[in-house]
Amino acid sequence: MSRYKEIDLSGVRRISFETRTTKVDATMFGRPDLDSDDFGFFFDGLPDILAARDLKTLAVQTAAAIRNQKPIVLMMGAHLIKCGVSPLLCQLMRRGVVSTLVTNGAGLIHDFEVALFGRTSEDVAASLETGLFGFVEETGIWLNEAMVEGAAQGWGMGEAAARKLQTLPVKHPDKSLLLTAFECGVPLTVHSAIGTETIHQHPETDGAAIGETTYRDFKILCEQLTRLEGGMVFLYGSAVILPEVFLKALTVVRNLGHTVKQFTAVNFDMIRHYRPQENVVSRPTRTGGHGFTIVGHHELLIPLFWQGVYHELRKAKSG
Protein backbone atom coordinates (compact mmCIF):
# COMPACT_ATOMS: atom_id res chain seq x y z
CA MET A 1 0.00 0.00 0.00
CA SER A 2 1.43 3.36 -1.07
CA ARG A 3 1.82 6.09 1.51
CA TYR A 4 0.40 8.57 -1.02
CA LYS A 5 -3.29 9.02 -1.78
CA GLU A 6 -4.51 8.33 -5.34
CA ILE A 7 -7.39 10.18 -7.00
CA ASP A 8 -10.70 8.32 -7.33
CA LEU A 9 -11.70 8.02 -11.02
CA SER A 10 -15.10 6.41 -10.38
CA GLY A 11 -16.87 9.75 -10.72
CA VAL A 12 -15.43 10.92 -14.05
CA ARG A 13 -17.85 12.02 -16.80
CA ARG A 14 -17.77 10.18 -20.11
CA ILE A 15 -19.31 10.68 -23.54
CA SER A 16 -20.24 8.40 -26.41
CA PHE A 17 -17.77 8.15 -29.28
CA GLU A 18 -20.59 9.30 -31.58
CA THR A 19 -20.70 12.71 -29.89
CA ARG A 20 -16.94 13.25 -29.76
CA THR A 21 -15.38 15.60 -32.29
CA THR A 22 -12.60 13.95 -34.33
CA LYS A 23 -10.02 15.47 -36.66
CA VAL A 24 -9.18 12.34 -38.65
CA ASP A 25 -11.41 9.78 -40.30
CA ALA A 26 -10.78 6.95 -42.70
CA THR A 27 -12.04 8.91 -45.73
CA MET A 28 -8.97 11.13 -45.38
CA PHE A 29 -6.50 8.27 -45.54
CA GLY A 30 -4.20 7.71 -48.48
CA ARG A 31 -5.07 5.42 -51.35
CA PRO A 32 -1.88 3.53 -52.22
CA ASP A 33 -1.44 1.57 -55.41
CA LEU A 34 2.04 0.10 -55.48
CA ASP A 35 1.38 -1.66 -58.77
CA SER A 36 0.64 1.50 -60.76
CA ASP A 37 3.05 3.95 -62.39
CA ASP A 38 0.27 6.51 -62.97
CA PHE A 39 1.29 9.80 -61.34
CA GLY A 40 -2.24 11.19 -61.27
CA PHE A 41 -3.51 8.18 -59.36
CA PHE A 42 -0.63 8.56 -56.93
CA PHE A 43 -1.15 12.30 -56.42
CA ASP A 44 -4.91 12.05 -55.95
CA GLY A 45 -4.29 9.18 -53.55
CA LEU A 46 -2.13 11.19 -51.16
CA PRO A 47 -3.69 11.47 -47.68
CA ASP A 48 -6.08 14.38 -47.27
CA ILE A 49 -4.24 15.33 -44.10
CA LEU A 50 -1.80 18.09 -43.03
CA ALA A 51 0.93 18.90 -45.58
CA ALA A 52 -0.42 16.48 -48.20
CA ARG A 53 -3.78 18.24 -48.05
CA ASP A 54 -2.07 21.61 -48.39
CA LEU A 55 -0.02 20.38 -51.34
CA LYS A 56 -3.10 19.15 -53.19
CA THR A 57 -5.05 22.31 -52.35
CA LEU A 58 -2.21 24.45 -53.65
CA ALA A 59 -1.99 22.39 -56.84
CA VAL A 60 -5.67 23.05 -57.50
CA GLN A 61 -5.31 26.78 -56.76
CA THR A 62 -2.21 27.11 -58.93
CA ALA A 63 -3.85 25.29 -61.82
CA ALA A 64 -6.81 27.67 -61.55
CA ALA A 65 -4.46 30.67 -61.53
CA ILE A 66 -2.78 29.39 -64.69
CA ARG A 67 -6.10 28.81 -66.44
CA ASN A 68 -7.29 32.29 -65.44
CA GLN A 69 -3.96 33.86 -66.49
CA LYS A 70 -3.26 35.26 -63.04
CA PRO A 71 0.27 36.37 -62.09
CA ILE A 72 2.58 33.76 -60.60
CA VAL A 73 5.67 35.21 -58.95
CA LEU A 74 8.53 32.83 -58.08
CA MET A 75 11.08 34.02 -55.53
CA MET A 76 14.08 31.76 -55.04
CA GLY A 77 17.43 31.53 -53.32
CA ALA A 78 20.53 29.99 -54.89
CA HIS A 79 19.86 26.64 -53.25
CA LEU A 80 17.32 25.74 -55.93
CA ILE A 81 19.97 25.97 -58.64
CA LYS A 82 22.34 23.72 -56.68
CA CYS A 83 19.48 21.26 -56.18
CA GLY A 84 19.04 20.87 -59.93
CA VAL A 85 15.58 22.42 -60.19
CA SER A 86 16.48 25.09 -62.79
CA PRO A 87 15.33 23.07 -65.85
CA LEU A 88 11.85 22.78 -64.34
CA LEU A 89 11.64 26.53 -63.74
CA CYS A 90 12.91 27.17 -67.28
CA GLN A 91 10.15 24.96 -68.64
CA LEU A 92 7.54 26.86 -66.61
CA MET A 93 8.80 30.13 -68.09
CA ARG A 94 8.68 28.75 -71.62
CA ARG A 95 5.07 27.73 -71.02
CA GLY A 96 4.16 31.24 -69.89
CA VAL A 97 3.38 30.19 -66.34
CA VAL A 98 5.83 32.47 -64.50
CA SER A 99 5.10 36.20 -64.59
CA THR A 100 8.17 37.24 -62.57
CA LEU A 101 11.26 35.40 -61.32
CA VAL A 102 13.04 36.88 -58.32
CA THR A 103 16.42 35.84 -56.89
CA ASN A 104 19.32 37.09 -54.78
CA GLY A 105 22.95 37.74 -55.70
CA ALA A 106 23.99 34.16 -55.03
CA GLY A 107 21.29 32.91 -57.39
CA LEU A 108 22.68 35.23 -60.06
CA ILE A 109 26.21 33.86 -59.62
CA HIS A 110 25.29 30.18 -59.61
CA ASP A 111 23.04 30.49 -62.66
CA PHE A 112 25.73 32.46 -64.50
CA GLU A 113 28.29 29.72 -63.84
CA VAL A 114 25.92 26.90 -64.79
CA ALA A 115 25.16 28.63 -68.09
CA LEU A 116 28.83 29.14 -68.89
CA PHE A 117 30.52 26.06 -67.50
CA GLY A 118 27.81 23.57 -66.52
CA ARG A 119 29.26 23.54 -62.98
CA THR A 120 28.99 25.69 -59.85
CA SER A 121 29.22 25.67 -56.03
CA GLU A 122 32.82 25.51 -54.85
CA ASP A 123 34.11 23.80 -51.70
CA VAL A 124 33.91 26.81 -49.38
CA ALA A 125 35.82 25.28 -46.47
CA ALA A 126 38.76 24.23 -48.62
CA SER A 127 38.89 27.53 -50.55
CA LEU A 128 38.56 29.57 -47.38
CA GLU A 129 41.72 27.99 -45.95
CA THR A 130 43.75 29.10 -48.96
CA GLY A 131 42.18 32.56 -49.16
CA LEU A 132 40.82 31.83 -52.63
CA PHE A 133 37.12 31.44 -51.83
CA GLY A 134 35.12 33.33 -54.44
CA PHE A 135 38.10 34.46 -56.48
CA VAL A 136 37.19 32.79 -59.76
CA GLU A 137 38.47 35.20 -62.39
CA GLU A 138 35.87 34.71 -65.10
CA THR A 139 32.84 35.01 -62.79
CA GLY A 140 34.22 38.06 -60.99
CA ILE A 141 35.27 39.96 -64.09
CA TRP A 142 32.33 39.21 -66.35
CA LEU A 143 29.56 39.79 -63.82
CA ASN A 144 31.12 43.03 -62.62
CA GLU A 145 31.45 44.15 -66.23
CA ALA A 146 27.78 43.34 -66.68
CA MET A 147 26.81 45.53 -63.71
CA VAL A 148 28.82 48.50 -65.01
CA GLU A 149 27.32 48.21 -68.49
CA GLY A 150 23.86 47.69 -67.03
CA ALA A 151 24.13 50.85 -64.94
CA ALA A 152 25.18 52.81 -68.03
CA GLN A 153 22.47 51.36 -70.28
CA GLY A 154 19.59 51.60 -67.79
CA TRP A 155 19.22 47.83 -67.28
CA GLY A 156 18.43 46.02 -64.08
CA MET A 157 20.89 43.49 -62.68
CA GLY A 158 19.06 40.46 -64.07
CA GLU A 159 18.81 41.91 -67.56
CA ALA A 160 22.44 43.06 -67.48
CA ALA A 161 23.68 39.58 -66.58
CA ALA A 162 21.50 37.94 -69.25
CA ARG A 163 22.77 40.33 -71.92
CA LYS A 164 26.35 39.61 -70.84
CA LEU A 165 25.77 35.88 -71.18
CA GLN A 166 24.59 36.43 -74.74
CA THR A 167 28.08 37.72 -75.60
CA LEU A 168 29.95 34.79 -74.02
CA PRO A 169 30.57 31.16 -75.07
CA VAL A 170 27.70 29.64 -73.10
CA LYS A 171 27.65 25.84 -72.84
CA HIS A 172 24.24 25.30 -71.25
CA PRO A 173 21.78 28.04 -72.28
CA ASP A 174 18.83 25.68 -71.87
CA LYS A 175 19.56 25.36 -68.14
CA SER A 176 20.02 29.07 -67.49
CA LEU A 177 17.27 30.96 -65.69
CA LEU A 178 18.81 34.27 -66.76
CA LEU A 179 18.84 33.44 -70.47
CA THR A 180 15.47 31.68 -70.46
CA ALA A 181 13.77 34.55 -68.66
CA PHE A 182 15.28 37.11 -71.03
CA GLU A 183 14.29 35.13 -74.12
CA CYS A 184 10.74 34.61 -72.80
CA GLY A 185 10.27 38.22 -71.76
CA VAL A 186 9.93 37.30 -68.08
CA PRO A 187 11.37 39.93 -65.72
CA LEU A 188 14.12 38.29 -63.64
CA THR A 189 14.99 40.64 -60.80
CA VAL A 190 18.14 40.26 -58.69
CA HIS A 191 18.33 41.69 -55.17
CA SER A 192 21.91 41.99 -53.99
CA ALA A 193 23.31 43.22 -50.67
CA ILE A 194 26.77 44.75 -50.94
CA GLY A 195 29.40 42.48 -49.41
CA THR A 196 27.33 39.30 -49.47
CA GLU A 197 28.45 37.99 -52.87
CA THR A 198 31.81 36.59 -53.96
CA ILE A 199 31.95 38.93 -56.96
CA HIS A 200 32.17 41.87 -54.54
CA GLN A 201 35.67 40.71 -53.57
CA HIS A 202 37.15 41.51 -56.98
CA PRO A 203 38.97 44.70 -57.97
CA GLU A 204 36.52 45.24 -60.87
CA THR A 205 33.63 45.67 -58.43
CA ASP A 206 31.76 48.95 -58.79
CA GLY A 207 29.52 49.51 -55.78
CA ALA A 208 27.58 52.27 -57.51
CA ALA A 209 26.82 50.00 -60.48
CA ILE A 210 25.67 47.19 -58.19
CA GLY A 211 23.45 49.56 -56.27
CA GLU A 212 22.03 51.13 -59.42
CA THR A 213 21.18 47.85 -61.16
CA THR A 214 19.76 46.04 -58.14
CA TYR A 215 17.68 49.13 -57.24
CA ARG A 216 16.23 49.15 -60.75
CA ASP A 217 15.29 45.52 -60.23
CA PHE A 218 13.56 46.46 -56.98
CA LYS A 219 11.44 48.99 -58.87
CA ILE A 220 10.73 46.45 -61.62
CA LEU A 221 9.54 44.00 -58.96
CA CYS A 222 7.30 46.69 -57.47
CA GLU A 223 5.74 47.27 -60.89
CA GLN A 224 5.14 43.54 -61.33
CA LEU A 225 3.43 43.30 -57.94
CA THR A 226 0.87 45.94 -58.92
CA ARG A 227 -0.89 43.13 -60.83
CA LEU A 228 -0.64 40.48 -58.11
CA GLU A 229 -4.31 40.65 -57.05
CA GLY A 230 -5.78 37.17 -57.48
CA GLY A 231 -2.36 35.69 -58.20
CA MET A 232 0.22 33.64 -56.34
CA VAL A 233 3.65 34.18 -54.79
CA PHE A 234 6.02 31.28 -54.13
CA LEU A 235 9.14 31.63 -51.98
CA TYR A 236 11.75 28.91 -52.43
CA GLY A 237 14.70 28.84 -50.06
CA SER A 238 15.49 32.44 -49.11
CA ALA A 239 15.43 33.06 -45.38
CA VAL A 240 16.27 36.77 -45.20
CA ILE A 241 16.89 38.85 -48.34
CA LEU A 242 13.86 38.03 -50.45
CA PRO A 243 11.27 38.04 -47.64
CA GLU A 244 12.49 41.52 -46.71
CA VAL A 245 12.48 42.71 -50.32
CA PHE A 246 8.98 41.33 -50.92
CA LEU A 247 7.57 43.06 -47.83
CA LYS A 248 8.96 46.44 -48.88
CA ALA A 249 7.88 46.05 -52.50
CA LEU A 250 4.36 45.11 -51.46
CA THR A 251 4.26 48.13 -49.16
CA VAL A 252 5.26 50.43 -52.04
CA VAL A 253 2.53 48.98 -54.24
CA ARG A 254 -0.17 49.41 -51.60
CA ASN A 255 1.11 52.89 -50.72
CA LEU A 256 0.64 53.94 -54.35
CA GLY A 257 -3.00 52.87 -54.22
CA HIS A 258 -2.92 49.53 -55.99
CA THR A 259 -5.30 46.89 -54.66
CA VAL A 260 -3.21 43.86 -53.77
CA LYS A 261 -5.07 42.04 -51.00
CA GLN A 262 -6.37 38.74 -52.32
CA PHE A 263 -3.50 36.49 -53.31
CA THR A 264 -1.94 33.23 -52.18
CA ALA A 265 1.52 33.25 -50.60
CA VAL A 266 3.46 30.00 -50.27
CA ASN A 267 6.80 29.23 -48.63
CA PHE A 268 8.60 26.02 -49.59
CA ASP A 269 11.69 25.37 -47.49
CA MET A 270 13.57 22.68 -45.59
CA ILE A 271 12.88 24.32 -42.21
CA ARG A 272 10.64 27.09 -40.93
CA HIS A 273 12.26 30.52 -40.70
CA TYR A 274 10.87 33.67 -39.09
CA ARG A 275 11.00 36.06 -42.04
CA PRO A 276 9.50 33.79 -44.71
CA GLN A 277 6.66 32.93 -42.35
CA GLU A 278 5.94 36.49 -41.24
CA ASN A 279 6.96 38.63 -44.24
CA VAL A 280 5.57 36.41 -47.00
CA VAL A 281 3.02 33.94 -45.63
CA SER A 282 1.36 35.68 -42.67
CA ARG A 283 1.52 39.47 -42.65
CA PRO A 284 0.76 40.17 -46.35
CA THR A 285 -2.31 37.88 -46.31
CA ARG A 286 -3.68 38.92 -42.92
CA THR A 287 -6.45 41.06 -44.43
CA GLY A 288 -7.19 38.72 -47.33
CA GLY A 289 -5.81 35.84 -49.36
CA HIS A 290 -4.22 32.64 -48.11
CA GLY A 291 -0.82 31.62 -46.77
CA PHE A 292 0.79 28.18 -46.78
CA THR A 293 4.08 26.73 -45.55
CA ILE A 294 5.33 23.43 -46.95
CA VAL A 295 8.43 21.94 -45.32
CA GLY A 296 10.71 19.56 -47.20
CA HIS A 297 13.64 19.20 -49.57
CA HIS A 298 13.40 21.36 -52.68
CA GLU A 299 14.73 18.69 -55.05
CA LEU A 300 11.79 16.46 -54.06
CA LEU A 301 8.92 18.79 -53.24
CA ILE A 302 9.12 21.30 -56.07
CA PRO A 303 9.07 18.75 -58.94
CA LEU A 304 6.34 16.82 -57.10
CA PHE A 305 4.26 19.94 -56.64
CA TRP A 306 4.47 21.20 -60.23
CA GLN A 307 3.77 17.73 -61.59
CA GLY A 308 0.68 17.84 -59.40
CA VAL A 309 -0.29 21.22 -60.85
CA TYR A 310 -0.16 19.87 -64.39
CA HIS A 311 -2.11 16.82 -63.30
CA GLU A 312 -4.84 19.19 -62.08
CA LEU A 313 -4.69 21.12 -65.36
CA ARG A 314 -5.16 17.93 -67.35
CA LYS A 315 -8.07 16.88 -65.10
CA ALA A 316 -9.79 20.22 -65.63
CA LYS A 317 -9.27 20.04 -69.38
CA SER A 318 -10.62 16.51 -69.68
CA GLY A 319 -13.51 17.23 -67.33
Image (tube, grey):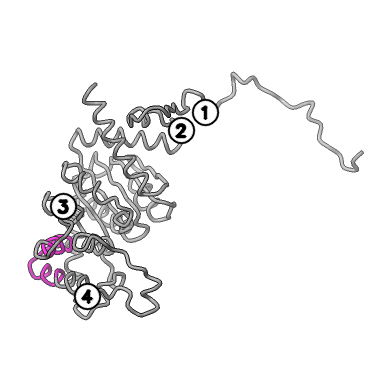
Residue sitting at 27 percent across and 54 percent down?
A: 251
Q: Which mark is residue 180?
A: 3
Q: Give whichever of discs 1 and 4 has the lower sequence position.
A: 1
The single residue placed furthest to the front in the displayed view is: 35
Look at discs 1 and 3 and give the one toward the viewer: 3
- 91 over 139 or under it: above or below: above
- Cα–Cα gap, marks 4 and 2: 51 Å
Look at discs 1 and 4 and give the one toward the viewer: 4
Residues at circles 4 and 3 in contact by the CB criterion of under 8 Å: no
- Cα–Cα gap, marks 4 and 3: 25 Å
**Location of mark 4 (residue):** 137
Residues at circles 1 and 2 in contact by the CB criterion of under 8 Å: yes
Badge 3 crowding class, 10 Å Cα cut-off, few under 14, some 14 to 19, many 20 or more, is many
Q: Check disc 2 and report its element: helix, strand or loop.
A: loop
Q: Which residues are magenta?
A: 146-165
Q: Say which quarter of the image contains residue 143.
A: bottom left
**Location of mark 1 (residue):** 24
Q: Check disc 4 and report its element: helix, strand or loop.
A: helix
Badge 4 crowding class, 10 Å Cα cut-off, few under 14, some 14 to 19, many 20 or more, is few
Residue 250 percent across, percent down from the top left = 26, 52
Look at discs 2 and 3 and give the one toward the viewer: 3
Q: Check disc 1 and report its element: helix, strand or loop.
A: loop
For the N terminus, which image quadrant? top right
Main SS, magenta residues: helix
- Cα–Cα gap, marks 2 and 3: 37 Å
For the C terminus, which image quadrant? top left
**Location of mark 2 (residue):** 49
Residues at circles 4 and 2 in contact by the CB criterion of under 8 Å: no
